[in-house]
Structure formats: structure tokens, C-alpha cells
Amino acid sequence: MNTVLAGHGLVKKYGSTTALSGVDVEVGERDSLAIMGPSGSGKSTLLHTLAGIVRPDDGQVLLRGERIDKLGENRLSALRRKRFGFVFQFGQLLPELPAEENVALPLMLEDMPRGRAVERARRWFAPLGIDGLEKRRPGQLSGGQAQRVAIARALVVEPDVVFADEPTGALDQTTSTEVVRLLTSVTREQGAALVMVTHDADVAAHCDRILQVRDGQITHYTQYTAA
């Protein structure tokens, strides 16, 4: 596996609570990794640590061999904007912007002119099955459509890694299956790695690998052939 992102010996404590206890994890190009576990197990802390949102107390996070957990805040923030994409449970789209501008937003934050950014954003609508919805605002979209817009926003910067935190948690079962299939397939096609936290075993089964986390430790590892 051509490793894109790695965490070695990750430790994170919140007061007397150990959220991560020496966790090792790697994810490669076109690789999809699901992280599962009960509430409070450390799965979201692991995702946030790998994404540079939370700094580990010990251990290292490396992106293509470069250590990122010791970067200053400005460099780390720029790295998250340029090389990571994020999909959240409720999309977190800006309600006042049409879908195409929500997708273009990461590009505009990097000072790309609005016209160019929107043109680039529009290229994602047909592949994600949302062509014709470019001008709709989030309140005019179904849950599944909104998540597809969120996936487009995550991919528009052509990231090394896409992080998805319960991306289907607010969707019904049929829509959930459609969205996770799309998310895993399109990230693979783009050559990006996918790291996803989910409580749903059916969703996790679409990933190449599954990690079970409990009490801040990996308790089970499954190599899985994606559906």
C-alpha cells in the first residue's frame, strides 16, 4: 500500500480520560477505512487527530511522510484547506449560498476568483448525480442531495484524504446506501484516501478496511472487499 496518511503511537488524554492509547493506523491511495466503536470509544478523536483538528499528546501524524502534528496553526490550517476534504453528518452547507457556491467555497477561500471557482465546482454536479441543482440553496435540497453537494465540496480541492464523520447518520437506509457507495467510489476514482467514522455496520462494509475501537485502542481489524 502506498501510504498517504499514517498515525503512529497516537495518545490523547482529556483530563483523567484516555481517548487514544498508543493507536497505529495507516491509509493509502484509493484506500477506504471505516472506524467503528461505541460512543466514547475514541473513534471521533482518532479521526480528528489524523485530520489535524486535534493534536496528539504523544505519537506522530504523517501526510505522505511529512510530520504534520507539529506544524504551526497557520500551516496546519492551510494544509486542511488544500489537502483534506471533510464531509459531516449534517453537511454543514451555508444556507445563504446556492449549491454551486457551497462547493466552490474552499477554492474561493484560497483566493481563486469566484467565476473560476464556480466553473470548477460545476464539474462535480453531473458525476455526483446532482446536475440541475447548482442554483438551489441547501433548504431546497433533500438530505441525500445535500450530502452529495457536501461530497462535491470535499473533493473540489482534489484532496489527498477525505474525512467523513457519520456522513449517513441523518439519512434513511436507502439514501444512506446510495451516498456511501458514491462516496467510496468517487474518492477511489480520484485517487484519494477515505477515512470514515460510522456507527452503521452496513455503511462500514462498503469500505476496504474496518477498525473497531474501544477505550482508545484498536480491538479488531477487518480487511474487507468493498461492495
Image: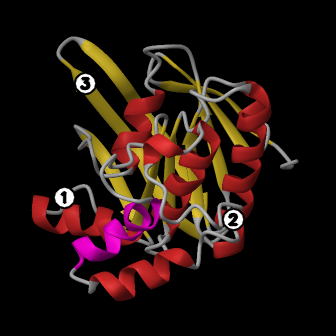
- At label 1, which amino acid type do we have? Lys
Q: Counting other residues with Cα less than 10 Å from the Cα at mark 3, is it few (<14), some (14-19), or many (20 or more)?
A: some
Foreground tag (1 vs 2):
2
Residue 156 within the magenta-colored segment of the rendering: no
The correct choice, above or below, for 152 with respect to 169 in the image is below
Q: Is residue 103 magenta?
A: yes
Residue identified by numbered label 3: 13
In what element is the residue under mark 1? loop
The reply, left or right, for residue 70 in relation to residue 96 is left
For mark 3, give the secondary structure.
strand
Which amino acid type is marked by label 2? Val
Distance between the alpha carbons at the discs numbered 2 and 3: 35 Å
Residue 180: quadrant of the picture: top right
Sequence-wise, the earlier of marks 2 and 3 is 3
Identify residue for label 1: 70
Q: Which colour scheme is used?
A: secondary structure
* Residue 23 visible in rendering: yes
Residue at point 39%, 71% (across, down): 104
Report how far apart the C-alphas of labels 1 and 2 lie in the structure.
31 Å
Range of magenta residues:
99-110
What residue is shown with label 2? Answer: 186
Residue shown at the point (43%, 65%) measured from the top left: 103
